[in-house]
Image (cartoon, coloured by chain):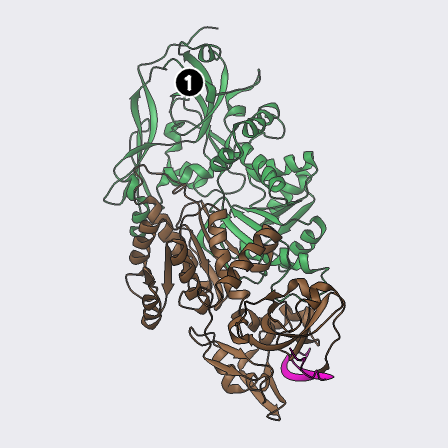
Chain colours: A green, B brown
């Protein structure tokens, strides 16, 4: 396999929030680093824009104020960060930060170690930030070698969504629940979770907001789909919870009343067969993990669901650390093996680094709408 | 010891919510039960009105509508249950329910078993409902024999508040936290928790709402007292959290923004020494357990505290079941040993069963105001 020419410098997308309250997104030309002995240099060929990338990318700026200057090849996006958000950003002010959680690409240079040398010329999945760039060095042991015949686009999203959705079923088992509830359930991640659950025989209650999202899931073969915009939402959800016995929900919305409504319906399901009055509610533990924040408004819990409940934040990385390397490795191996089936991602548009900084693109992927997922191809011109 | 005369029937306080939406509190004359072989008959001499008794007692009725009829010796309180609350009460409608979580009294009759016989004539603490009554049977093994010289008033509250406050420190240790936060901290339970923490060398951050509550705790020797009504509340709390490293809060309030404010300050404390920006917040797990509902309004969480957090309901009984009999027994033994010191309760008024159903009394204990705790003496006339 021929080694392609490696340039001395290459592009990297940067996000900067200035003390003045201005966000600035730009492409910087940075030196292509030399891999150390245990590292490889990956030519990044595809890297997705995940919801989990947006907080770092946009820095809590109000993107409706975004403007573009610079050139087509080197655009500069500016936007205003609302003053009340600035306090939360103290630690990142005036630092030009690289962005991008995960990606895939070809190992074009390798350090002296056998592990690094073994990856030369291979397509690998990588995770760890700074992926919106043309090149990135990575420890060899942290690369996930993709099965032969896997394209960069196919491998670009092999960590965040696959491991998150797979971990949801793992949490379910470890915490003693027997079925799952998921919100924003027609998302790329939600579709993946449906495929996992169907394959593994896990009952999954999908909560969506729109008829077209119901349709996406119905076509996929999902059995339990409830629409939170329906007047019969609470009854529909309770019925699905009685049937499935689901007492664990992963919630991508975060804000508003939804998490509390899920708990209320879980409690109603738990009490559906109870014969005796208990002033403290059922003795069934009901849990909602908030893993996203599509709705940034406060979470409102009316606590009409007894005393056996929990709501909490949930993040993939600490979970993987908690279960330990071996258990996490099993999850990663399953993802690699089923990358083109269970864990396939779909993108609505492929853009270059410069195109990712156009207002048109930002207006679409910034909305995090179901079915709108962008893939950056850092090697693509303009 | 002479066995007192045992009547054939005796008084029991009852709470009834009718399908019509009316609450009715009354005293019923019920047969004094015969203890089985493994049971004893306790002449209940003192039983406290705890906040945890009020939900069952009042059945979510609006007590500002309360009226009293009947006679002085046999009053009948009626009040209206708001219509929106009726759904939550379905399981108890039209059932006349006994009330009262805990109490103390003398064993006046015992079943044939040696364990029961051994308790005859002894003062015991008992828990398990139906304590607002003149007599109650109890399994011998469930009675807590009180040290010689303990009065019924001293022993009446030896379960709910002592075990709850002591369990808070147990949860802290088991879940890996190093200090505690407590709200409504000048309550009877809060004072107890301060005494435990001082004795055991645990840092405790007390949150109160009023200067006179600060004063109660200051006199007790509490080190960290913050007032949530102060304009500098968030700064004061953050400073106390930095000093103590407290990442676990037990919250008796439940509603409003307080639980979220505590998490926000815990996150600020965790980040106080952080040097690198993390878009997901600190990696310190912050937990609030809601164990009461002094504010019945929704819990509002603005989620400005990263992703490593949890909020949940907390109840004593499931916790004791979870840690198992032996661990729970250790807690009970410590309570019995320190009943007159660490775990002493104080009452503002002692009332008979009939007096507990006067509007004056209801207006006071129904408010759950700090420092206003009532003790029912079921043997007291009128």
Magenta highlight on residue B5: yes
Question: Within 10 angstroms of label 1, few (less than 14), some, or many (20 or more) residues?
Answer: many
Q: Which residue is mark 1?
A: A43
Element on which disc 1 rests? strand
Percent x, y for residue B359? 52, 86
Chain assignment, label 1: A
Which residue occupies 60% across, 40% down? A174
- Quarter holding the C terminus of chain B is bottom right
Where residue B106 appears, x then y in whole percent? Answer: 62, 75
Asked whether A23 or B84 is in front, the reply is B84
Up-down relation of residue B16 to residue B101 (above or below): below
Left or right: A164, with A218 as reference point: left
> Percent position (x, y) of residue A104?
47, 23
Examine the rendered structure and indicate whether residue A167 appears above or below residue A65: above
What stretch of residues is rendered in magenta?
B1-29
Q: Does residue B27 lie above or below A233 as drawn?
A: below
**Would residue B207 be found to the left or right of residue B82 on screen?**
left
Q: Is residue A14 left or right of residue B324?
A: left
Extreme residue in the top direction: A2
């Amino acid at each position: 396999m021929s080694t392609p020419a490696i340039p001395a410098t290459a592009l990297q997308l940067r996000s900067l929030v200035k003390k003045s309250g201005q966000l600035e997104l730009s492409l910087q030309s940075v030196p292509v680093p030399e891999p150390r002995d245990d590292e490889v240099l990956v030519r990044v060929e595809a890297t997705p824009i995940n919801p989990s990338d947006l907080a770092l990318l946009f820095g809590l700026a109000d993107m409706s104020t975004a403007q573009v200057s610079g050139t087509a090849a080197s655009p500069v996006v500016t936007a205003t960060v609302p003053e009340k958000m600035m306090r939360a950003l103290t630690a990142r002010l005036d630092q030009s930060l690289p962005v991008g959680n995960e990606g895939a690409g070809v190992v074009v240079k390798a350090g002296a170690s056998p592990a690094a040398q073994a990856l030369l010329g291979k397509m690998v999945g990588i995770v760890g930030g700074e992926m919106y760039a043309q090149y990135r060095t990575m420890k060899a042991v942290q690369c996930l070698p993709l099965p032969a015949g896997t394209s960069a686009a196919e491998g670009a999203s092999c960590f965040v969504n696959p491991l998150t959705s797979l971990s949801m079923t793992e949490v379910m088992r470890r915490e003693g629940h027997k079925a799952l509830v998921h919100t924003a359930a027609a998302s790329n991640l939600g579709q993946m979770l449906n495929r996992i659950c169907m394959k593994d025989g896990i009952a999954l209650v999908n909560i969506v907001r729109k008829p077209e999202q119901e349709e996406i899931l119905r076509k996929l073969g999902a059995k339990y789909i409830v629409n939170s915009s329906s007047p019969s939402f609470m009854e529909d959800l309770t019925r699905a919870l009685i049937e499935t016995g689901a007492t664990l929900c992963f919630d991508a919305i975060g804000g508003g009343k939804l998490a509390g409504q899920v708990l209320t319906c879980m409690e109603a399901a738990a009490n559906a067969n109870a014969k005796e009055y208990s002033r403290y509610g059922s003795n069934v533990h009901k849990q909602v993990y908030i893993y996203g924040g599509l709705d940034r408004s406060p979470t409102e819990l009316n606590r009409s669901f007894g005393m056996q409940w929990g709501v909490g934040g949930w993040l993939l990385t600490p979970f993987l650390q908690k279960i330990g390397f071996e258990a996490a490795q099993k999850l990663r191996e399953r993802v690699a093996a089923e990358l083109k089936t269970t864990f396939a991602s779909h993108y609505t548009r492929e853009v270059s680094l410069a195109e990712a900084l156009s207002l048109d693109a930002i207006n679409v992927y910034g909305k995090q709408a179901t079915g709108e997922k962008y893939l950056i191809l850092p090697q693509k011109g303009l």
